[in-house]
Amino acid sequence: MTVPETRTRPAPKAAVILTAGAERRIAALMAQAPADAIGVKLSTPRRGCSGLAYSVDYVTEEARFDEKIETPGGVLYIDGASVLYLVGSTMDWVEDDFTAGFVFTNPNAKGACGCGESFMV
């Protein structure tokens, strides 16, 4: 009798890739977070000229369909309804003399408004 070969499935890749800068910023946010915050959550609410925008906020409880990405400094949750718009994206934190903020490279975005505040898929 032969024993069937067992295969292990590789761990699924995260929907969003975080740069070291984004991970450092999440750690900084969690260091000053309200006591009940369990992480930060990335979502894509409908707003702006192009339809969808990126939003990062503190989160106090896990939602059933949210994706959870653990980083050295804290947890990033991705809103379950937003994952399809974000798969394959890279999230970075960029600071210069005039602005600071999360910047997204999103292969699903088909266009963006002129001010860069919103995108469409």
Image: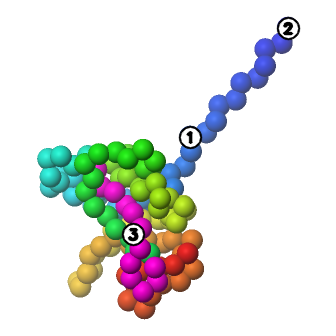
Which SS type dominates the magenta stretch?
loop
Q: Secondary structure at mark 2?
A: loop
Question: On the rendered structure, is 98 left or right of 54?
Answer: left
Q: Is residue 22 magenta?
A: no
Residues under numbered marks 3 and 1 in contact, where contact means CB atoms less than 8 Å apart: no
Lower sequence index among marks 3 and 1: 1
Q: How is the image coloured?
A: rainbow
Q: Is residue 6 left or right of residue 95?
A: right
User: What stretch of residues is rendered in magenta?
Assistant: 39-51
Q: Position of residue 63 (x, y in %)?
A: 38, 47
Measure the C-alpha gap from mark 3 to mark 1: 29 Å
Left or right: 36 with respect to 19?
left
> Where, by quadrant of the figure, is residue 47 drawn?
bottom left
Q: Is residue 6 visible?
A: yes
In three-dimensional space, the C-alpha distance between marks 1 and 2, rounded to whole angstroms, equals 31 Å
Kind of residue sitting beneath label 3: Pro
Q: Residue at x 46, y 54 (%)?
A: 80
- The residue depicted at 21 percent of the width and 49 percent of the height is 37
| Label of residue 28 in the image | none
Return the residue at label 1.
11
Mark 3 — residue?
A: 45
Foreground of the two, 47 or 4: 47
| Rendered view: 121 above or below 6 | below
Q: Quadrant of the C terminus?
A: bottom right
Q: Residue at x 33, y 48 (%)?
A: 75
